[in-house]
Image (cartoon, grey):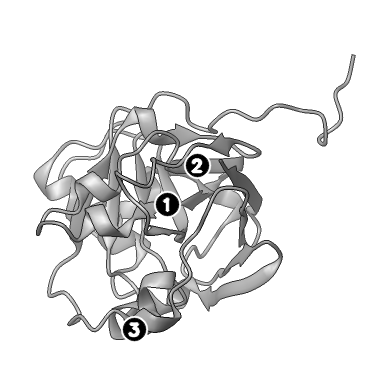
Amino acid sequence: ALVTEARAKFAPVVPRPEKILCVGLNYRKHAEESGMAVPPVPILFSKFANSLSGHGAKIKLLPPEAATNFDYEVELVIVIGRKAVNVSETDALKYVFGYCNGNDLSSRDLQMRTSQWMLGKMQDGFAPIGPWLVTADQIPNPNALQVETRVNGELRQSENTSDMIYNCAHIVSYCSRYLTLKPGDIIFTGTPSGVILGHPAEKRVWLKAGDKVSTTIEKLGTLEVTLA
């Protein structure tokens, strides 16, 4: 029997990637709002498979004694389709299977505890991706897509992937110089301005249990999760 979209249970659109790579500070306006210099090369960090979740997921936050500064980050996610080793920027997108919507949820107090960001990025469920995986032939220019975030229906982020400092082709080429990219690997390409961390300290209202966070990327659909 057919199941309607409203009743369907969504899994992560890539269930078992070998690698989950992420790019930090990759939008010009986001670097500005964060008070950080434009990075001279892509800033890379990683998440792990425990962080994956899907559209409609309920994501449990850490208890207050562990972390309190929870933030959203809408991100275009690249899904690798072919083994890539030291590929040129000109050819890089030929190695992409497709794209999906992602939310790089972050615990900012843990992220900023040290110079290494990983602790604030790797909580269970903190890498929702979906609801759809769209093949690359349907996205001729991944750096011309509108991206948005809404929290409980309120618009928080609205930008275009054209504001990326390092575009998708550059990211794939750069990563492939230093490690082998394999089919199913995913790359979070960075978030635009409008994150909670970018607000003045006195105006930051962090995410909390019960919040619904919706990220929308042009041609890729809307990914919604509920925090618990």
Q: Position of residue 46 (x, y in %)?
A: 24, 44
Around disc 3, counting alpha carbons within 10 Å, would you say few (fewer than 14), some (14 to 19), or many (20 or more)?
A: some
Label 2 or label 3, whichever comes before in sequence order: 3
| Callout 3 amino acid | Glu
Q: Is residue 196 left or right of residue 175?
A: right
User: What mark, if any, has residue 128 been given in the picture?
Assistant: 2
Helix or strand or loop: what does disc 3 sit on?
Answer: helix
Q: CA distance from mark 1 to mark 3?
A: 18 Å
Question: Pointer 1: what residue?
Answer: 105
Q: CA distance from mark 2 to mark 1?
A: 8 Å
Q: CA distance from mark 2 to mark 3?
A: 24 Å
Around disc 2, counting alpha carbons within 10 Å, would you say few (fewer than 14), some (14 to 19), or many (20 or more)?
A: many
Q: Position of residue 211 (x, y in %)?
A: 61, 54
| Callout 1 amino acid | Leu
Label 2 or label 1, whichever comes before in sequence order: 1
Q: Please name whichever residue, 120 or 45, is drawn nearer the observer in this view of the structure.
A: 120
Of badges 2 and 1, the one in the foreground is: 1
Helix or strand or loop: what does disc 1 sit on?
Answer: loop
